[in-house]
Image: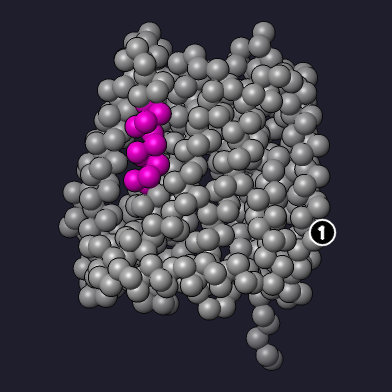
Protein backbone atom coordinates (compact mmCIF):
# COMPACT_ATOMS: atom_id res chain seq x y z
CA UNK A 1 0.00 0.00 0.00
CA UNK A 2 1.28 3.48 -0.88
CA UNK A 3 2.43 5.44 2.22
CA UNK A 4 0.31 8.42 1.13
CA UNK A 5 -2.76 6.16 0.96
CA UNK A 6 -2.13 4.42 4.29
CA UNK A 7 -1.95 7.71 6.22
CA UNK A 8 -5.58 8.34 5.30
CA UNK A 9 -6.39 5.59 7.81
CA UNK A 10 -5.25 7.70 10.75
CA UNK A 11 -4.72 11.42 9.99
CA UNK A 12 -8.45 12.27 9.63
CA UNK A 13 -9.48 10.37 12.78
CA UNK A 14 -6.46 11.60 14.78
CA UNK A 15 -7.12 15.30 14.16
CA UNK A 16 -10.85 14.84 14.59
CA UNK A 17 -10.10 13.34 18.02
CA UNK A 18 -7.75 16.25 18.79
CA UNK A 19 -10.40 18.92 18.19
CA UNK A 20 -13.42 17.35 19.91
CA UNK A 21 -12.27 17.65 23.58
CA UNK A 22 -11.22 21.28 23.04
CA UNK A 23 -14.58 22.35 21.65
CA UNK A 24 -16.36 20.40 24.39
CA UNK A 25 -14.64 22.25 27.25
CA UNK A 26 -14.63 25.67 25.55
CA UNK A 27 -18.07 25.82 23.89
CA UNK A 28 -20.29 22.83 24.60
CA UNK A 29 -19.79 23.23 28.36
CA UNK A 30 -21.00 26.84 28.08
CA UNK A 31 -24.21 25.78 26.32
CA UNK A 32 -24.82 22.90 28.74
CA UNK A 33 -24.44 25.14 31.78
CA UNK A 34 -26.80 27.70 30.24
CA UNK A 35 -29.39 24.98 29.69
CA UNK A 36 -28.93 23.88 33.32
CA UNK A 37 -29.65 27.38 34.67
CA UNK A 38 -26.14 28.53 35.67
CA UNK A 39 -25.64 32.32 35.57
CA UNK A 40 -23.69 33.99 32.75
CA UNK A 41 -21.21 35.37 35.30
CA UNK A 42 -20.35 31.92 36.67
CA UNK A 43 -20.31 30.30 33.22
CA UNK A 44 -17.85 32.82 31.77
CA UNK A 45 -15.60 32.88 34.85
CA UNK A 46 -15.28 29.17 35.49
CA UNK A 47 -15.22 27.89 31.92
CA UNK A 48 -12.53 30.47 31.07
CA UNK A 49 -10.29 28.76 33.64
CA UNK A 50 -10.47 25.67 31.42
CA UNK A 51 -8.08 27.44 29.02
CA UNK A 52 -5.31 27.14 31.63
CA UNK A 53 -4.05 23.67 30.60
CA UNK A 54 -3.67 24.94 27.02
CA UNK A 55 -1.81 28.02 28.33
CA UNK A 56 0.75 26.02 30.29
CA UNK A 57 1.03 22.88 28.15
CA UNK A 58 4.50 23.95 26.85
CA UNK A 59 5.68 23.56 30.47
CA UNK A 60 5.03 19.82 30.56
CA UNK A 61 5.60 18.96 26.91
CA UNK A 62 9.21 17.88 27.72
CA UNK A 63 7.81 15.27 30.11
CA UNK A 64 5.69 13.77 27.33
CA UNK A 65 8.95 13.34 25.41
CA UNK A 66 10.64 11.73 28.41
CA UNK A 67 8.17 8.96 29.14
CA UNK A 68 6.72 6.41 26.74
CA UNK A 69 6.03 7.02 23.05
CA UNK A 70 3.78 9.57 21.36
CA UNK A 71 1.68 6.66 20.11
CA UNK A 72 1.24 5.41 23.67
CA UNK A 73 0.13 8.85 24.87
CA UNK A 74 -2.45 9.16 22.06
CA UNK A 75 -4.06 5.75 22.58
CA UNK A 76 -4.04 5.97 26.38
CA UNK A 77 -5.36 9.53 26.59
CA UNK A 78 -8.22 8.78 24.21
CA UNK A 79 -9.26 5.97 26.54
CA UNK A 80 -8.92 8.38 29.49
CA UNK A 81 -10.98 11.01 27.67
CA UNK A 82 -13.70 8.44 27.02
CA UNK A 83 -13.82 7.65 30.75
CA UNK A 84 -13.86 11.36 31.64
CA UNK A 85 -16.76 12.11 29.29
CA UNK A 86 -18.60 9.24 30.98
CA UNK A 87 -17.75 10.87 34.32
CA UNK A 88 -19.27 14.17 33.15
CA UNK A 89 -22.47 12.30 32.27
CA UNK A 90 -22.59 10.81 35.78
CA UNK A 91 -22.18 14.23 37.47
CA UNK A 92 -25.19 15.79 35.71
CA UNK A 93 -27.94 14.35 38.00
CA UNK A 94 -26.00 15.22 41.20
CA UNK A 95 -27.07 18.03 43.53
CA UNK A 96 -23.62 19.63 43.27
CA UNK A 97 -23.33 18.92 39.55
CA UNK A 98 -21.78 22.32 38.69
CA UNK A 99 -18.74 21.82 40.91
CA UNK A 100 -18.46 18.10 40.10
CA UNK A 101 -18.77 18.59 36.34
CA UNK A 102 -16.27 21.47 36.42
CA UNK A 103 -13.74 19.15 38.06
CA UNK A 104 -14.39 16.58 35.34
CA UNK A 105 -13.99 19.26 32.64
CA UNK A 106 -10.69 20.31 34.23
CA UNK A 107 -9.44 16.75 33.86
CA UNK A 108 -10.73 16.67 30.27
CA UNK A 109 -8.85 19.91 29.52
CA UNK A 110 -5.55 18.59 30.92
CA UNK A 111 -5.94 15.29 29.07
CA UNK A 112 -6.84 17.16 25.87
CA UNK A 113 -3.82 19.47 26.10
CA UNK A 114 -1.52 16.48 26.66
CA UNK A 115 -3.19 14.64 23.77
CA UNK A 116 -2.41 17.69 21.59
CA UNK A 117 1.29 17.39 22.44
CA UNK A 118 1.35 13.71 21.56
CA UNK A 119 -0.68 14.17 18.37
CA UNK A 120 1.42 16.97 16.91
CA UNK A 121 4.65 15.21 17.86
CA UNK A 122 3.47 11.95 16.32
CA UNK A 123 2.51 13.74 13.08
CA UNK A 124 6.08 14.97 12.67
CA UNK A 125 7.62 11.60 13.57
CA UNK A 126 5.36 9.38 11.46
CA UNK A 127 5.51 11.39 8.22
CA UNK A 128 8.25 12.44 5.86
CA UNK A 129 8.64 16.20 5.44
CA UNK A 130 6.87 16.24 2.07
CA UNK A 131 3.97 14.27 3.57
CA UNK A 132 3.70 16.71 6.47
CA UNK A 133 3.28 19.55 3.98
CA UNK A 134 0.90 17.59 1.76
CA UNK A 135 -1.46 16.62 4.57
CA UNK A 136 -1.52 19.87 6.56
CA UNK A 137 -4.76 20.83 4.80
CA UNK A 138 -6.30 17.44 5.57
CA UNK A 139 -5.52 17.65 9.29
CA UNK A 140 -6.90 21.19 9.39
CA UNK A 141 -10.10 20.13 7.61
CA UNK A 142 -10.83 17.29 10.04
CA UNK A 143 -9.98 19.50 13.02
CA UNK A 144 -12.59 21.96 11.72
CA UNK A 145 -15.00 19.07 11.23
CA UNK A 146 -14.63 18.29 14.92
CA UNK A 147 -15.60 21.90 15.68
CA UNK A 148 -18.73 21.49 13.53
CA UNK A 149 -19.53 18.26 15.38
CA UNK A 150 -19.02 19.75 18.85
CA UNK A 151 -20.73 23.12 18.32
CA UNK A 152 -23.29 21.94 15.79
CA UNK A 153 -24.30 18.28 15.76
CA UNK A 154 -23.97 17.61 19.50
CA UNK A 155 -25.87 20.78 20.46
CA UNK A 156 -28.58 19.79 17.97
CA UNK A 157 -28.66 16.29 19.48
CA UNK A 158 -29.07 17.73 22.97
CA UNK A 159 -32.03 19.79 21.78
CA UNK A 160 -33.70 16.82 20.10
CA UNK A 161 -33.28 14.53 23.13
CA UNK A 162 -34.59 17.28 25.41
CA UNK A 163 -37.69 17.70 23.23
CA UNK A 164 -38.24 13.94 23.16
CA UNK A 165 -37.59 13.21 26.85
CA UNK A 166 -38.67 16.50 28.40
CA UNK A 167 -35.51 16.49 30.53
CA UNK A 168 -32.45 18.72 30.13
CA UNK A 169 -30.46 16.37 32.36
CA UNK A 170 -31.25 13.32 30.25
CA UNK A 171 -30.36 15.25 27.06
CA UNK A 172 -26.86 16.12 28.25
CA UNK A 173 -26.27 12.69 29.79
CA UNK A 174 -26.99 11.19 26.37
CA UNK A 175 -24.60 13.66 24.66
CA UNK A 176 -21.73 12.83 27.02
CA UNK A 177 -22.54 9.13 26.81
CA UNK A 178 -22.13 9.38 23.04
CA UNK A 179 -18.81 11.18 23.52
CA UNK A 180 -17.60 8.52 25.95
CA UNK A 181 -18.40 5.73 23.50
CA UNK A 182 -16.80 7.69 20.63
CA UNK A 183 -13.46 8.12 22.40
CA UNK A 184 -13.26 4.57 23.67
CA UNK A 185 -13.84 3.45 20.07
CA UNK A 186 -11.21 5.92 18.78
CA UNK A 187 -8.67 4.60 21.30
CA UNK A 188 -9.13 1.01 20.14
CA UNK A 189 -9.11 2.08 16.49
CA UNK A 190 -5.87 4.06 16.81
CA UNK A 191 -4.23 1.18 18.66
CA UNK A 192 -4.31 -0.72 15.37
CA UNK A 193 -4.42 2.09 12.76
CA UNK A 194 -1.49 4.22 13.94
CA UNK A 195 1.89 3.22 12.50
CA UNK A 196 4.87 2.49 14.77
CA UNK A 197 7.66 4.90 13.73
CA UNK A 198 11.17 3.84 14.66
CA UNK A 199 11.93 7.38 15.87
CA UNK A 200 8.94 7.39 18.25
CA UNK A 201 10.64 6.59 21.54
CA UNK A 202 11.07 8.08 24.99
CA UNK A 203 13.86 10.62 25.44
CA UNK A 204 14.87 9.20 28.81
CA UNK A 205 17.37 11.86 29.94
CA UNK A 206 15.26 13.96 32.32
CA UNK A 207 17.89 16.54 33.28
CA UNK A 208 18.87 17.19 29.66
CA UNK A 209 15.27 17.64 28.48
CA UNK A 210 14.34 20.02 31.34
CA UNK A 211 17.55 22.02 30.94
CA UNK A 212 16.95 22.28 27.20
CA UNK A 213 13.39 23.54 27.80
CA UNK A 214 14.55 26.40 30.03
CA UNK A 215 17.23 27.34 27.52
CA UNK A 216 14.60 27.45 24.76
CA UNK A 217 12.26 29.61 26.88
CA UNK A 218 15.12 31.98 27.74
CA UNK A 219 15.94 32.27 24.03
CA UNK A 220 12.32 33.27 23.35
CA UNK A 221 12.48 36.03 25.99
CA UNK A 222 15.68 37.37 24.38
CA UNK A 223 13.97 37.99 21.03
CA UNK A 224 13.89 41.59 19.81
CA UNK A 225 10.90 43.63 21.03
CA UNK A 226 9.62 40.62 22.95
CA UNK A 227 7.34 42.72 25.19
CA UNK A 228 5.60 44.15 22.13
CA UNK A 229 5.27 40.62 20.77
CA UNK A 230 3.68 39.39 24.00
CA UNK A 231 1.36 42.43 24.08
CA UNK A 232 0.22 41.63 20.53
CA UNK A 233 -0.39 37.98 21.37
CA UNK A 234 -2.44 38.95 24.43
CA UNK A 235 -4.44 41.90 23.06
CA UNK A 236 -5.04 41.34 19.32
CA UNK A 237 -8.24 39.39 20.11
CA UNK A 238 -9.24 41.37 23.22
CA UNK A 239 -12.80 42.03 22.03
CA UNK A 240 -13.30 38.63 20.40
CA UNK A 241 -12.13 36.81 23.55
CA UNK A 242 -15.01 38.41 25.48
CA UNK A 243 -17.56 37.98 22.70
CA UNK A 244 -16.91 34.27 22.18
CA UNK A 245 -17.96 33.43 25.76
CA UNK A 246 -21.17 35.47 25.65
CA UNK A 247 -22.40 34.97 22.07
CA UNK A 248 -23.94 31.49 22.54
CA UNK A 249 -25.49 32.60 25.85
CA UNK A 250 -27.04 35.61 24.09
CA UNK A 251 -28.48 33.39 21.38
CA UNK A 252 -30.01 31.04 23.97
CA UNK A 253 -31.29 33.59 26.50
CA UNK A 254 -34.98 34.52 26.52
CA UNK A 255 -36.23 37.68 24.80
CA UNK A 256 -37.27 39.26 28.10
CA UNK A 257 -33.67 38.85 29.33
CA UNK A 258 -32.30 40.60 26.25
CA UNK A 259 -31.38 37.45 24.32
CA UNK A 260 -32.74 35.99 21.09
CA UNK A 261 -34.55 32.99 22.58
CA UNK A 262 -33.20 30.37 20.17
CA UNK A 263 -33.55 26.65 20.83
CA UNK A 264 -30.55 24.32 21.13
CA UNK A 265 -31.26 23.04 17.63
CA UNK A 266 -31.27 26.57 16.20
CA UNK A 267 -28.04 27.45 18.02
CA UNK A 268 -26.48 24.23 16.71
CA UNK A 269 -27.35 25.26 13.17
CA UNK A 270 -26.71 29.02 13.37
CA UNK A 271 -23.64 29.21 15.62
CA UNK A 272 -22.23 25.70 15.48
CA UNK A 273 -22.66 24.96 11.77
CA UNK A 274 -23.17 28.14 9.72
CA UNK A 275 -20.88 30.12 12.00
CA UNK A 276 -18.11 27.52 11.96
CA UNK A 277 -18.33 27.11 8.17
CA UNK A 278 -18.02 30.91 7.79
CA UNK A 279 -15.07 30.95 10.20
CA UNK A 280 -13.34 28.28 8.11
CA UNK A 281 -14.02 30.13 4.85
CA UNK A 282 -12.70 33.36 6.34
CA UNK A 283 -9.53 31.58 7.44
CA UNK A 284 -8.97 30.08 4.00
CA UNK A 285 -9.41 33.45 2.28
CA UNK A 286 -7.21 35.12 4.89
CA UNK A 287 -4.40 32.67 4.21
CA UNK A 288 -4.78 33.20 0.46
CA UNK A 289 -4.68 36.99 0.90
CA UNK A 290 -1.47 36.85 2.93
CA UNK A 291 0.10 34.49 0.39
CA UNK A 292 -0.63 37.05 -2.34
CA UNK A 293 -0.02 40.37 -0.61
CA UNK A 294 2.14 39.53 2.42
CA UNK A 295 1.38 39.88 6.13
CA UNK A 296 2.48 43.52 6.33
CA UNK A 297 -0.05 44.65 3.72
CA UNK A 298 -2.84 42.50 5.20
CA UNK A 299 -2.35 43.34 8.88
CA UNK A 300 -4.62 46.40 9.10
CA UNK A 301 -7.44 45.03 6.91
CA UNK A 302 -7.38 41.90 9.08
CA UNK A 303 -7.33 43.89 12.33
CA UNK A 304 -10.44 45.68 11.08
CA UNK A 305 -12.04 42.41 9.92
CA UNK A 306 -11.74 40.82 13.36
CA UNK A 307 -13.42 43.80 15.06
CA UNK A 308 -15.82 45.71 12.77
CA UNK A 309 -18.25 42.76 12.34
CA UNK A 310 -18.90 42.89 16.10
CA UNK A 311 -21.40 45.59 15.17
CA UNK A 312 -23.81 42.86 14.02
CA UNK A 313 -24.24 41.79 17.64
CA UNK A 314 -25.05 45.39 18.61
CA UNK A 315 -27.79 45.28 15.97
CA UNK A 316 -29.06 41.87 17.11
CA UNK A 317 -29.16 42.94 20.77
CA UNK A 318 -31.03 46.20 20.17
CA UNK A 319 -33.47 44.90 17.53
CA UNK A 320 -33.88 41.26 18.71
CA UNK A 321 -35.02 39.99 15.29
CA UNK A 322 -37.02 36.78 15.07
CA UNK A 323 -35.86 35.75 11.59
CA UNK A 324 -33.50 32.78 11.87
CA UNK A 325 -32.11 33.66 8.44
CA UNK A 326 -31.23 37.19 9.52
CA UNK A 327 -29.64 35.94 12.73
CA UNK A 328 -27.71 33.28 10.81
CA UNK A 329 -26.44 35.85 8.30
CA UNK A 330 -25.29 38.15 11.11
CA UNK A 331 -23.47 35.36 12.94
CA UNK A 332 -21.90 34.19 9.66
CA UNK A 333 -20.62 37.71 8.93
CA UNK A 334 -19.02 38.02 12.37
CA UNK A 335 -17.44 34.57 12.20
CA UNK A 336 -16.15 35.17 8.66
CA UNK A 337 -14.45 38.37 9.85
CA UNK A 338 -12.95 36.51 12.80
CA UNK A 339 -11.58 33.76 10.56
CA UNK A 340 -10.16 36.29 8.08
CA UNK A 341 -8.62 38.48 10.78
CA UNK A 342 -7.21 35.58 12.78
CA UNK A 343 -5.01 34.62 9.82
CA UNK A 344 -2.76 37.59 10.61
CA UNK A 345 -2.38 36.37 14.19
CA UNK A 346 -1.32 32.87 13.11
CA UNK A 347 1.18 34.15 10.55
CA UNK A 348 2.62 36.58 13.09
CA UNK A 349 3.21 33.68 15.49
CA UNK A 350 4.98 31.80 12.71
CA UNK A 351 7.15 34.86 11.99
CA UNK A 352 8.03 35.28 15.69
CA UNK A 353 8.86 31.58 16.06
CA UNK A 354 11.05 31.44 12.95
CA UNK A 355 14.69 30.56 13.51
CA UNK A 356 16.32 28.18 15.97
CA UNK A 357 13.83 26.31 18.22
CA UNK A 358 10.94 27.27 15.94
CA UNK A 359 8.72 24.37 17.08
CA UNK A 360 9.19 25.12 20.77
CA UNK A 361 8.86 28.88 20.27
CA UNK A 362 5.64 28.39 18.32
CA UNK A 363 4.31 26.29 21.22
CA UNK A 364 5.15 29.15 23.59
CA UNK A 365 3.24 31.53 21.32
CA UNK A 366 0.21 29.23 21.43
CA UNK A 367 0.40 29.36 25.23
CA UNK A 368 0.09 33.15 25.09
CA UNK A 369 -2.69 32.70 22.53
CA UNK A 370 -4.69 30.58 24.99
CA UNK A 371 -3.99 33.10 27.77
CA UNK A 372 -5.35 35.87 25.54
CA UNK A 373 -8.70 34.03 25.47
CA UNK A 374 -8.68 32.99 29.11
CA UNK A 375 -8.17 36.35 30.88
CA UNK A 376 -10.77 38.49 29.04
CA UNK A 377 -13.24 35.61 29.07
CA UNK A 378 -13.08 35.41 32.87
CA UNK A 379 -14.60 38.85 33.43
CA UNK A 380 -16.87 38.91 30.37
CA UNK A 381 -19.79 37.28 32.20
CA UNK A 382 -19.84 39.72 35.11
CA UNK A 383 -19.44 42.62 32.68
CA UNK A 384 -22.39 41.42 30.60
CA UNK A 385 -24.50 40.97 33.73
CA UNK A 386 -23.72 44.54 34.77
CA UNK A 387 -24.24 46.17 31.34
CA UNK A 388 -26.91 43.97 29.76
CA UNK A 389 -26.47 42.38 26.33
CA UNK A 390 -26.94 45.52 24.18
CA UNK A 391 -24.44 47.71 26.05
CA UNK A 392 -22.05 44.79 26.50
CA UNK A 393 -21.81 44.44 22.71
CA UNK A 394 -21.23 48.19 22.42
CA UNK A 395 -18.34 47.69 24.85
CA UNK A 396 -17.02 44.87 22.66
CA UNK A 397 -16.77 47.35 19.76
CA UNK A 398 -14.85 49.79 21.99
CA UNK A 399 -12.58 46.90 23.02
CA UNK A 400 -11.17 46.96 19.48
CA UNK A 401 -8.85 49.79 20.50
CA UNK A 402 -6.15 47.56 22.07
CA UNK A 403 -6.08 45.57 18.81
CA UNK A 404 -5.25 48.66 16.80
CA UNK A 405 -2.63 49.85 19.33
CA UNK A 406 -0.67 46.57 19.27
CA UNK A 407 -1.05 46.30 15.47
CA UNK A 408 0.61 49.72 15.19
CA UNK A 409 3.46 48.73 17.51
CA UNK A 410 4.64 45.47 15.94
CA UNK A 411 7.17 45.26 13.14
CA UNK A 412 6.48 42.89 10.24
CA UNK A 413 9.03 41.88 7.61
CA UNK A 414 7.90 43.42 4.27
CA UNK A 415 7.50 40.19 2.29
CA UNK A 416 6.76 37.76 5.11
CA UNK A 417 4.06 35.30 4.11
CA UNK A 418 3.98 36.37 0.46
CA UNK A 419 4.34 33.55 -2.02
CA UNK A 420 7.61 33.98 -3.88
CA UNK A 421 7.35 34.13 -7.65
CA UNK A 422 9.43 31.63 -9.55
CA UNK A 423 12.03 33.12 -11.90
CA UNK A 424 10.97 33.14 -15.54
Residue that extends furthest to the bottom in the rendered view of this protein: 424
| Residue 1 vertical position relative to residue 366 in the rendered view, above or below | below
Q: Residue at image x 76%, y 55%?
A: 406
**Which quadrant does the C terminus fall into?**
bottom right
Which residue range is magenta in the image?
Answer: 101-112
**Which quadrant does the N terminus fall into?**
bottom left
Q: Residue at image x 60%, y 16%?
A: 253
Q: Where is residue 357 in the image (x, y as percent from the top left)?
A: 50, 74
> At numbered mark 1, what does the secondary structure look like: helix, strand or loop?
helix
Q: Where is residue 384 in the image (x, y as percent from the top left)?
A: 68, 23
Q: Residue at image x 50%, y 37%?
A: 49
Q: In this view, does 241 lie to the left or right of 299?
A: left
Residue 207 in view:
yes
Q: Where is residue 381 in the image (x, y as percent from the top left)?
A: 62, 26
Please tell me which residue lies in front, 415 or 52.
Answer: 52
| Residue 375 vertical position relative to residue 407 in the rendered view, above or below | above
Q: Name the residue that disc number 1 marks.
A: 408
Q: Residue at image x 38%, y 67%?
A: 210
Amino acid sequence: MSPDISVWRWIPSLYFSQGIPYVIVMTLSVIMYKNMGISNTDIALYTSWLYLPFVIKPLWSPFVDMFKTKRYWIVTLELVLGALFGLVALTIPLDGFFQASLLAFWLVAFASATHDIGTDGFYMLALEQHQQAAFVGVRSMFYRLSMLTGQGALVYLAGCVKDFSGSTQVAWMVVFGVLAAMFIALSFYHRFALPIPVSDKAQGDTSQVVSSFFQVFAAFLKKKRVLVTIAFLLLYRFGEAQLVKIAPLFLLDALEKGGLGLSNQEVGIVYGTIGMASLTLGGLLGGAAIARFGLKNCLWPMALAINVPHLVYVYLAFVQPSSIWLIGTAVAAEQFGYGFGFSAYVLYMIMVADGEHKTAHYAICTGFMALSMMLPGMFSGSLQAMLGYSHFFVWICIAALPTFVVAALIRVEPDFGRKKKLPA
